[in-house]
Image: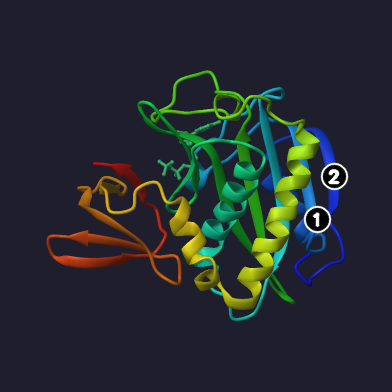
Amino acid sequence: LAGQAGRFDVDALDSCDSTSSELLRRAALGAPPGTVVVADRQLAGRGRRGRSWSSSPADSLTFSLLWRLPAGRVPGGLSLAVGVALAQALDALGANGVRLKWPNDVLLAGDTGFAKLAGVLVELASDRRGTQACIGIGINLAQPAGDFPQAVAGLSQAMARVPERHDMLAALLRALLDVLDRFAQAGFAALKDDWLAWHAWQDRPVQLLGEGEVPLVGVCRGVDDDGALLLETAAGLSRILAGDLSLRAA
Ligand code: ATP
């Protein structure tokens, strides 16, 4: 994988708490880069900040991939880089209307705006050889049922025939291999133009929500070479590193 391991080692589970939790436990026991855990059912799928990620066996693809962060590469742009791989692969599979939202979401453009199609969760684990990134990905194959604070979407709304899950996993891993290799060689800067080509909210008014704070309102000017969000506010151009922040249309 990206010069780190010759191949992926995919373990398909019926169920687990979260594919990322399972993979991080395996990383602590010495699992090598390229290890992939995919599960039909997640009992406690996670998003950022302890938020939950809901998935159902028939209607989602959830998997996590272990990857060694090359020395000198800041992890900031990694979840954006993963988004590029997902957008490229889903588009190539025939999905229409895929877009990216900073820092970690894949959206689907529809008649009434954007809806969340997939999420990326990057977590880091250090060991004596350096830093491993656990890259968790959850994709809705069909629109999930339930109450969500934002609109949600499934791939079946974007394409006539959703591929079998193992075919989709293979396509996504191939795209990740290419993108992670480029990230390893040159960092997010090498992928920035690709990311911007999929960007949902370029030059649009947005608000940035923090925990309990007044939202920061401005115009979204994309991202920089490190993957930081560029937000033009009344006070000028702010550079915002991924943190506990959520972006919304204003
Ligand atoms: P935001 O999407 O607001 O920027 P976030 O990046 O913190 O927030 P994630 O960590 O990507 O969110 O995902 C967790 C959130 O996604 C949950 O709080 C829930 O609102 C939403 N969510 C959970 N499961 C799904 C799903 N299957 N499809 C779409 N959205 C989901």
Specify the farthest residue to the left.
234
> Residue flagged by tag 1: what amino acid is it?
Thr
The N terminus, quarter of image: bottom right
**Ligand 1 near label 2 (Cβ, under 8 Å)?**
no
The residue beneath circle 2 is 11
Taking the image as shown, residue 1 lies to the left or right of residue 155, namely: right
Which is nearer the eye, 97 or 81? 97
Q: Is residue 132 visible?
A: no
Upstream in the sequence, badge 1 or badge 2?
2
Q: Is residue 207 visible?
A: yes
Residue at screen point 60% across, 57% down = 123
**Residue 236 in which image quadrant:** bottom left
Residue at screen point 78% across, 72% down = 3
The residue beneath circle 1 is 35
What element does badge 1 sit on? Answer: strand
Position in image of residue 69 (x %, y %): 66, 70
Specify the farthest residue to the bottom.
72
Position in image of residue 99 (x %, y %): 47, 44
Residue at screen point 68% across, 47% down = 20
The answer to whether the residue labelled 1 contacts the one labelled 2, judged by CB atoms less than 8 Å apart, is: yes
Colour setting: rainbow
Which is nearer the eye, 140 or 211? 140
